[in-house]
């Protein structure tokens, strides 16, 4: 018997699955807009892109972040700025924020895929990043970044100004 290829839902009522396989292959993160639209970060070895779906599963378009596997959503305005996007969040203006582990950068893009800003520098000093992965906003709109290979959390303003960090590699 082979391994199961679906999730077994125990203790909760199944309501809906969004995104046909051809639209949301390799999803790694999700941001939800004020209108309820889903912005899905999909990443594979060949192609990374953001797909937008309505809650009714209407395809609202997509744009590539990187990859030579062909265009998912037409001409990409940001291809070349990303290598291995890891996380996706949305700010109060509904701009998308993406961390990229390979470029060591944090980027802000519009919902349509236009690059607004990008910052980050590889290293281990305060404010430098080494494979940033998870990102989240605090109540003031500042950005927390999981600085993965530096084993710490760093806090920045949205324009990339370093505010603070904590954490270090442990042994336990």
Image (cartoon, grey):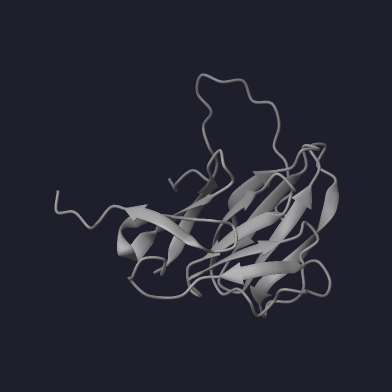
Residue at 51% in and 63% down: 161
Residue 77 locus on image (x, y percent): 77, 74
Which residue is painted at 59% across and 57% down in the image? Answer: 158
Q: Position of residue 96 (x, y in %)?
A: 68, 55
Q: Residue at x 48, y 68 (%)?
A: 101
Q: Nearer the viewer, residue 34 or 162?
A: 162
On-image quarter of the N terminus:
top left
Which is nearer the eye, 27 or 159? 159
Residue 157 in view: yes
The image quadrant that residue 43 belongs to is bottom right
Asked if residue 25 can be seen in this view, the reply is: no
Please determine whether, in this image, residue 138 is positioned above or below residue 127. above
Residue 127 % position (x, y): 41, 66
> In which quadrant of the rendered view does residue 63 lie?
bottom right
Side (left or right) of 48 relative to 125: right
Q: What residue is rendered at 32% in x and 64% in y?
A: 150
On the image, the x and y values in percent for residue 48 come to 64, 67
**Vertical placement of residue 118 versus 37, above or below:** below
Given residues 52 and 70, the one toward you in this image is 52
Vertical placement of 155 versus 85: above or below?
above
Number of disc labels:
0
Q: Is residue 133 left or right of residue 57?
A: left
């Amino acid at each position: 018997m082979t391994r199961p290829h679906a999730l077994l839902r125990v203790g909760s009522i199944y309501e809906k699955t969004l995104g046909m396989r051809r639209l949301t292959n390799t999803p790694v993160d999700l941001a939800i807009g004020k209108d309820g639209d889903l912005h899905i970060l999909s990443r594979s070895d060949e192609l990374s892109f953001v797909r937008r779906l309505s809650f009714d599963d209407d395809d609202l378009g997509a744009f590539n972040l990187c990859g030579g596997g062909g265009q998912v959503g037409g001409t990409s305005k940001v291809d070349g700025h990303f290598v291995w996007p890891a996380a996706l969040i949305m700010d109060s203006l509904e701009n998308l924020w993406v961390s990229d582990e390979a470029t060591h950068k944090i980027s802000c893009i519009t919902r349509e895929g236009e690059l607004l800003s990008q910052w980050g520098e590889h290293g281990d000093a305060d404010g430098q990043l080494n494979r940033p992965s998870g990102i989240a906003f605090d109540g003031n709109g500042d950005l927390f970044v999981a600085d993965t290979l530096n084993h710490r959390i760093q806090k920045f303003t949205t324009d990339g100004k370093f505010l603070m960090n904590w954490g270090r590699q442990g042994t336990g």
